[in-house]
Image (spheres, helix red, strand yellow):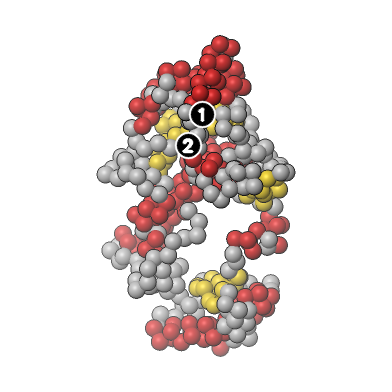
Amino acid sequence: MRLDDVRVIDLTTLLPGPYGTQLLADLGADVVKVERVDAGDDARYTPPLTEEGHGALFDAVNRGKRSIALDLKDERGREAIYELVSTADAFVEQFRPGVVDRLGVDYDTLREHNPDLVYCSLSGYGQSGPKSGKAAHDLNYIGLAGLLDMTRESEDEKPQMPGYPIADMAGGSFAAFSIVCALLSRELGGGGGEYVDCSLTDPVLSFSQSVAPNAFMGEDPRPGETALTGGYPWYDVYECADGRYATIAALEPRFWQGFCEAVDREDLLEYHMTDDEAELAALREELEALFASRSRDEWVEAIGDADAAVDGVYTPAEAFGHPQVEAMDIVEEQEGSLPRVGFPARGEGVPDGPLEGAPGHGEHTAELLREAGLSAADVDALVEAEVAGVGR
């Protein structure tokens, strides 16, 4: 899982693209973050801010990268990008369709400088279709993909915004996955470089596998009625005595049996997978009363090691302090800065320990230009242009 010899030129901002390239950096890739000369990535200044005044989100998804500040509307900046691209394996951009053509960093142009380049375009709706050039954010994408409609208990309620930006994170993940697959294909003899069109909407649509068959059969899945959205009382969220919540996901008979035995309610065994409306309603009432008799933590302790598919609902702060999360060792301490959520997998090939902190705006401009083979005079001129741009 090491990507130590892979160089990625990253023209993405805010969350989706930077999260995807962060995953690559976590595996050892040299990620070169190309930023505007005036202010850089907007996430640098987006609240919440750290004590040092940095955007906490920027620091979280730009660890270990190198930053270069270039004006791509200037011929010198474009020439510098071309030199960098000639040394790279992958290029990622997150503009609206058509912008890269105006900037001179489109796939056809860049492959003239590097025919083996893997080029990934990450956008909200993809490169084609009536919405391809439309401004949008995560909430719009999950709304179009059908996910937002399914976040409520019934059609009578307002759709609930998920607590995490699902389309952003899914899109970044799939971009990283696609880049690695294209690089692997190249290395296995599948050809040179290639163009990859990734959107933030497609992965959310891909996540719909549990309800898509119903939709394709003309049975529009409705919130609160499908197997995984509250249609079954044995797969639901219940309020506990302390106002917190617990989850039960006893889809398989053995888990339902484990639950019934753990709570000494074997009388409920026969109702698993019933399709009788009266029995379903009665069972839900029984479970509501049962869970309301103890606090969340008391339920977790009472279930213990039983195979019952029951657990608590935790806040993000509680989750990061949970013994299971601590055992997974995904939270990495950073000297002089906030902890970060590390790479979400473990294995011998995953680099150990945290990366260096997020780079300063244009911190590595001169270093990267020298590596690309630019002359000292050209490096000085571009660095001076960067300083002038920041001061505008």
Residue 162 in the image, given as x and y percentages of width and height: 47, 60
Residue 120 in the image, given as x and y percentages of width and height: 44, 34
Q: Is residue 267 above or below residue 7?
A: below
Residue 221 in the image, given as x and y percentages of width and height: 35, 66
Q: Is residue 220 above or below residue 244?
A: above
Q: CA distance from mark 2 to mark 1?
A: 19 Å
Residue 252 in the image, given as x and y percentages of width and height: 53, 71
Secondary structure found at label 2: loop
Please indicate, yes or no, whether residue 214 appears anywhere in the rendered image. yes
Tell me which residue sits at (59%, 17%) in the image.
370
User: 379 and 119: which one is in front?
Assistant: 379
Q: Which residue is mark 1?
A: 390
Place residue 360 in its image quadrant.
Answer: top right
Tell me which residue sits at (37%, 68%) in the image.
158
Compared across the picture, whether 207 is left or right of 125 comes to: right
Q: Quadrant of the N terminus?
A: top right
Compared across the picture, whether 189 is left or right of 355 comes to: left
